[in-house]
Image: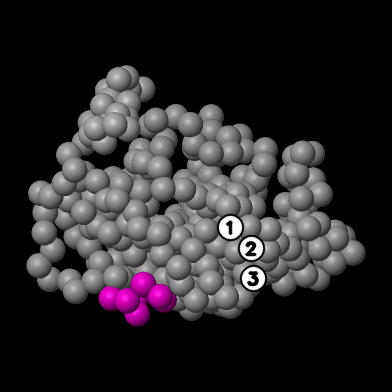
């Protein structure tokens, strides 16, 4: 509770969790604004932080850019253990509210109309490059991840841009035409406003599908997918994995039994994080990661 008269620090009356963390382990987000194609975009920057360790060799940390799902949703600054996982292990994180995100007004939200796969990709790339210019990230160790629609932005950024060195798609979309035909009824016409009318504008769908641009991919990609996903069916990840293998790009596909759209079992959430950390360790040549899981990269 707060005492407005004394203006003393707040007193905790009850807490929904019995977990506690040292302040030396928690990275507090800082909202950032950065220039992008349509003006200004927004995000939250988390600096790496772990009181038990200190980097003495690198001028700037590796950066993980996160693209939220939706895509017409938004991220936030509330406590996120999945982000603190990275900052406590030496990674900086940029959680991007790309154009189309809610919370910044109608005009900002409407940036994504007919422009999914363009505006969001521009914004995550420009956010990463902005932090490099500010000296807050190492330009040679930029990676990106996202789930669902964020997975599509991730794959698109890797296929259509040359900014990131690696990426992880969690139950993400590689083929927009397949999604238009396979997704569940509730979102069956969602893509009309984000991409275009289907099948009338099928050519646009193909042009913006990462799986149609495998020839432009050149960096390692990790694919994490729930077997029972009805929103983004497993065939999306399987097709992307097969296409990457044919081109000889380092990749790994992990399928999680009993998982749907978004992982819910604690052991799978933990394995997904540990697998992604191990994957980037291989890409960036980071050796001796404490507790690293064994990961076979094809």
- Residue corresponding to mark 1: 104
In the rendered image, residue 182, in percent from the top left (x then y), is placed at 75, 46
Residue at 45% x, 60% y is 43
Q: Quadrant of the N terminus?
A: top left
For image coordinates 50% across by 42% down, the residue present is 255
What is the CA distance from the residue labelled 2 to the residue labelled 1? 6 Å
> Relative to 46, does residue 227 appear above or below in the rendering?
above
Q: Position of residue 184 (x, y in %)?
A: 75, 40
Q: Observer-nearest residue: 283 or 296?
A: 283
Nearer-N-terminus badge (3/1): 1
Residue 91 relative to residue 23: left or right: right
- Residue 130 is covered by the magenta coloring: yes
Q: Secondary structure at mark 2?
A: helix
Queried whether the magenta region covers residue 109, the answer comes back as no
Q: Quick check: 76 left or right of 181?
A: left
Q: Residues within 10 Å of mark 2 (few under 14, many from 20)?
A: some
218 in relation to 222, above or below: below
Give the secondary structure at mark 1.
loop
> Magenta span covers which residues?
129-135
For residue 118, the mark is 3
Label 2, on which residue?
108
């Amino acid at each position: 509770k707060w005492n407005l008269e004394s203006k003393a620090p707040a007193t905790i009356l009850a807490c929904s969790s019995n977990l506690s963390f040292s302040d030396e382990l928690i990275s507090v987000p800082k909202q950032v604004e950065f220039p992008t194609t349509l003006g200004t975009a927004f995000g939250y920057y988390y600096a790496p932080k772990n009181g038990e360790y200190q980097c003495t060799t690198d001028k700037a940390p590796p950066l993980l850019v996160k693209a939220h799902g939706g895509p017409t949703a938004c991220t936030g600054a509330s406590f996120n253990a999945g982000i603190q996982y990275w900052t406590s292990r030496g990674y900086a994180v940029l959680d991007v509210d790309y154009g189309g995100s809610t919370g910044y007004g109608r005009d900002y939200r409407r940036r994504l109309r007919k422009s999914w796969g363009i505006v969001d990709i521009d914004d995550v790339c420009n956010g990463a490059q902005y932090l490099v210019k500010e000296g807050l990230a190492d330009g040679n160790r930029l990676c990106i991840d996202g789930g669902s629609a964020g997975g599509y932005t991730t794959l698109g950024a890797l296929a259509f841009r040359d900014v990131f060195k690696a990426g992880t798609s969690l139950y993400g979309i590689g083929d927009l035409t397949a999604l238009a035909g396979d997704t569940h009824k509730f979102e069956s016409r969602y893509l009309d406003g984000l991409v275009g009318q289907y099948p009338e504008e099928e050519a646009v769908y193909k042009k913006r599908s990462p799986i149609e641009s495998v020839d432009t991919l050149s960096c390692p990609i990790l694919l994490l997918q729930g077997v029972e996903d009805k929103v983004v069916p497993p065939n999306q990840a399987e097709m992307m994995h097969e296409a990457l293998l044919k081109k000889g790009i380092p990749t790994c596909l992990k399928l999680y039994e009993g998982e749907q759209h978004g992982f819910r079992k604690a052991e799978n959430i933990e394995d997904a994080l540990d697998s992604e950390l191990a994957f980037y360790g291989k890409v960036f040549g980071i050796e001796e990661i404490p507790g690293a899981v064994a990961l076979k990269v094809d």
